[in-house]
Amino acid sequence: MPRIIIRTEDAPAPIGPYNQAVLANDTLYISGQICIDPATGNLHNDSLQDETHQCMRNLKAVLAAAGMDFGHVVKTTIFLTDMHRFGEVNEVYGQYFSDDPPARETVQVAALPKFVNVEISMVAVK
């Protein structure tokens, strides 16, 4: 099976031994994105809504680098440090999927990289 590594400067560079995304056949596996602003390398975390929007902008950039958009997304995973704040994340997330949103799970975790509050990963299909 051919694997194509997807890289873009419009999303943060990986902070560990992984790629932004891997395209295998017609399926794109996007690594979890946190609220790093790719232009500055700084966290965009003034609020949970800001964090979530930055995650989604980063994911959008990786999708675009693979010739896709949110309409190609079939599955997402949201990692959240406080499930009591699920509604805040869900409100922002929903703005990116107007019709027929993908399958999704949201899980609470003890901590995330750089101690942010939310991380989102995606699977998309051409």
Image: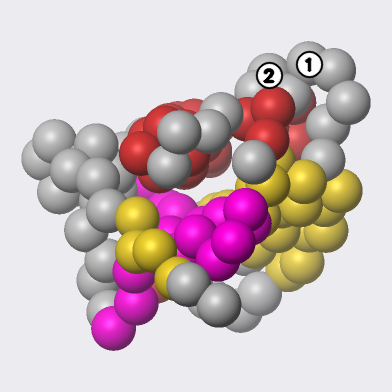
Q: Which mark is residue 9?
A: none
Residue 83 higher or lower than 38, as above or below: below
Question: Which residue is at a point 85% across and 17% down the rendered structure image?
Answer: 99
Q: Mark 2 is on which residue type?
A: Gln
Residue 104 higher or lower than 39, as above or below: below
**SS for tag 2?**
loop
The answer to whether residue 89 is seen in the rendering is no
User: Residue 84 at x, y = what percent?
Assistant: 78, 52
Q: Is residue 4 magenta?
A: no
Relative horizontal placement of residue 95, taking residue 51 as reference (left or right): right
Check the image and name the residue furthest to the front.
1
Q: Which mark is residue 95?
A: 2
Numbered range of the magenta stretch: 17-35
Residue density around tag 1, few if under 14, some if 14–19, many if 20 or more, within 10 Å: few
Residue 125 higher or lower than 107, as above or below: above
User: Residue 34 at x, y = what percent?
Assistant: 42, 53
Q: Is residue 20 magenta?
A: yes
User: Residue 4 at x, y = what percent?
Assistant: 39, 63
Question: Which residue is at a point 25% across and 71% down the rendered structure image?
Answer: 15
Residue 89 falls in image quadrant: top right
Residue 43 higher or lower than 39, as above or below: below
| Residue indicated by mark 1 | 98
Q: CA distance from mark 1 to mark 2?
A: 6 Å
**SS for tag 1?**
loop
Residue 65 falls in image quadrant: top left
Mark 1 or 2: the one toward you: 1
Question: Which residue is at a point 53% across and 33% down the rendered structure image?
Answer: 68
Relative horizontal placement of residue 125, taking residue 44 as reference (left or right): right
